[in-house]
Image (spheres, grey):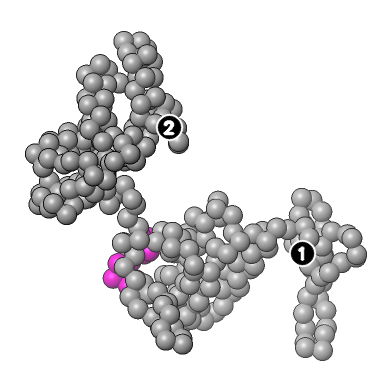
Amino acid sequence: MTRVASANTRGGSACTYSVVINRLSVAVTAGTAGGPAFRNTLSAGDRNALALAFFFASLDRDPQLADKIVVIDDPMTSLDEHRALTTIQEVRRLVDRVAQVIVLSHSKAFLAHLWEGADRLTRSAFRIIRRDDGSTLEPWEVTRDCITDHDRRHALVIEYLARPDPAKEREAATALRHILEAFVRVAYPDNFPPGSLLGPFLNICRQHVDTNQEVLDGTDISELQDLLEYANRFHHDTNPVYQTEYINDQELRMYCERTLHFARR
């Protein structure tokens, strides 16, 4: 900030100031027509970040902060993604300095991240739901919303192996290709970027066998090919009648075990 000056108004003492943006002094007030002003120089995200920074700074100057309940309403609105972690860290630091912190947000991902680092003994989570002509609060199971599709598929296959259920077997069979794709995406990101398919990936692997650029050896290539051949029977891209493909329980159990073993290497 620059050009900070005191001012007397009808409402009492105040101050005026400008904000230095890219080495240019920009007045917070409207400014001259067509010239640089606070509202046309900063993006919505920058303005929100600055307002949030002022809010945290004002808390630092409160002598009775330890007795206060601080409510933060949707701090991620218009904020850029790279500011999310910093905001979460600031909120966490605040928790130990005040009586209570209440955070409201439309972003489940933001709240889940905040929840994961909070004290398990003192944290609580609620969601606002529509009820009749108004709304009400009910407990929110945060961990359920933190689970990814890959987590669900993996748990589904594990559950099927432990307790075979004819009602779940088609879901388990359909999950196998997704599990393989997720594993290869993490294990070999250079050779399997987003949007890639396992068939072309296998061709790349075959081309580099026994070279200094080898991705999978011959044994692993053969195993992945077998697993993919089975999984493709239950995928809409490779089998138009995948929803009615016959399933043999013993065969499915074998390929579930082999898929999980391959993805645990």
Q: Position of residue 103 (x, y in %)?
A: 47, 72
The amino acid beneath tag 1 is: Arg
Say left or right for 153 vs 74. Answer: left
Q: Position of residue 98 (x, y in %)?
A: 45, 75
Q: Residue visible at 23% across and 21% down?
A: 222
- What secondary structure characterizes most of the magenta part? loop
Residue extending farthest right: 33
Dot 2 crowding, Cα within 10 Å, few <14, some 14–19, many 20+ = few
Q: Determine which residue is flagged by label 2.
A: 196
Say left or right for 172 vs 140. Answer: left
Secondary structure under tag 1 reads helix
* 17 in magenta: no
Q: Residue visible at 61% across and 61% down?
A: 78
Q: Residue visible at 41% across and 77% down?
A: 129
Find residue 116 and report its image quarter.
bottom left
Secondary structure under tag 2 reads loop
- The answer, for residue 30, to whether it is visible in the render is yes
Q: Nearer the viewer, residue 81 or 166?
A: 166
**Dot in front, 1 or 2:** 2
Q: Quadrant of the N terminus?
A: bottom right
Whether residue 253 is situated above or below residue 151 in the rendered picture: above
- The answer, for residue 215, to whether it is visible in the render is no
The amino acid beneath tag 2 is: Ser
Whether residue 68 is situated above or below residue 54 in the rendered picture: below
Q: Which mark is residue 39?
A: 1
Whether residue 31 is situated above or below residue 69 in the rendered picture: above
Dot 1 crowding, Cα within 10 Å, few <14, some 14–19, many 20+ = some
Say whether disc 1 or disc 2 marks the residue closer to the N-terminus.
Answer: 1
Whether residue 148 is situated above or below residue 78 in the rendered picture: above
Q: Position of residue 47 (x, y in %)?
A: 68, 63
Q: Nearer the viewer, residue 109 or 157?
A: 157
The reply to whether callout 1 and callout 2 are in contact (CB within 8 Å) is no
